[in-house]
Image (tube, helix red, strand yellow):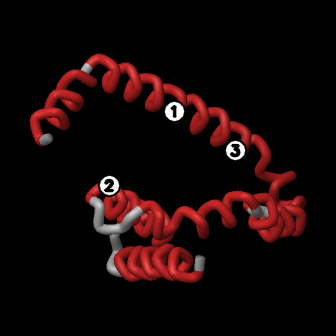
């Protein structure tokens, strides 16, 4: 399990280093994108990180405690800014739904291309 955690932390470190160069994305997002690419390319095997990921996901609720406390400390700011926050939540939710729907429809329409190319490589 420690080896899997070391792999996850290594990708977090690499992501933070890349983000420090001014990529425009947070380091944790860059690290997750790099980890996803490494898993897809077979550089990192799923078995290496599965156990550590399972433990982290099983205890995910505990990881939300610090941000929850942070939110409670800023109720006055949230109270003053609630209209902007509400608009941002609604707009971002609709945007995610639209992008997910359009992307899913595109993938379903073009799935033959992807499946055919994977079968040709075998």
Q: Residues within 10 Å of mark 1 (few under 14, many from 20)?
A: few
Q: Give the CA separation, mark 3 to mark 1.
A: 16 Å
* Residue 26 visible in the shown view: no
Element assignment for label 3: helix
Identify the residue at horizontal 59%, vertical 76% (top origin).
1
Q: Position of residue 86 (x, y in %)?
A: 73, 39
Nearer the N terminus, badge 2 or badge 1?
A: 2
111 on left or right of 103: left
111 on left or right of 3: left
Return the residue at label 1. Answer: 95
80 on left or right of 111: right
For the C terminus, give its image quadrant.
top left
* Residue 54 visible in the shown view: yes
Return the residue at label 3. Answer: 84
Q: How many marks?
A: 3
Q: Give the CA separation, mark 2 to mark 1.
A: 27 Å
Return the residue at label 2. Answer: 40
Element assignment for label 1: helix
Identify the residue at horizontal 32%, vertical 54% (top origin).
40
Q: Position of residue 70 (x, y in %)?
A: 81, 68
Q: Position of residue 45 (x, y in %)?
A: 38, 64
Nearer the N terminus, badge 3 or badge 1?
A: 3
């Amino acid at each position: 399990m420690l080896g899997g955690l070391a792999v996850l932390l290594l990708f977090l470190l690499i992501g933070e280093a890349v983000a420090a160069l001014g990529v425009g994305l947070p380091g944790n997002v860059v690290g997750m994108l790099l980890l996803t690419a490494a898993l897809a390319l077979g550089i990192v095997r799923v078995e290496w990180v599965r156990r550590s990921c399972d433990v982290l996901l099983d205890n995910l609720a505990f990881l939300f405690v610090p941000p929850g406390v942070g939110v409670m400390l800023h109720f006055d700011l949230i109270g003053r800014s609630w209209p902007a926050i509400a608009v941002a939540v609604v707009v971002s939710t609709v945007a995610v739904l639209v992008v997910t729907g359009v992307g899913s429809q595109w993938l379903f329409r073009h799935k033959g291309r992807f499946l055919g190319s994977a079968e040709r490589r075998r």
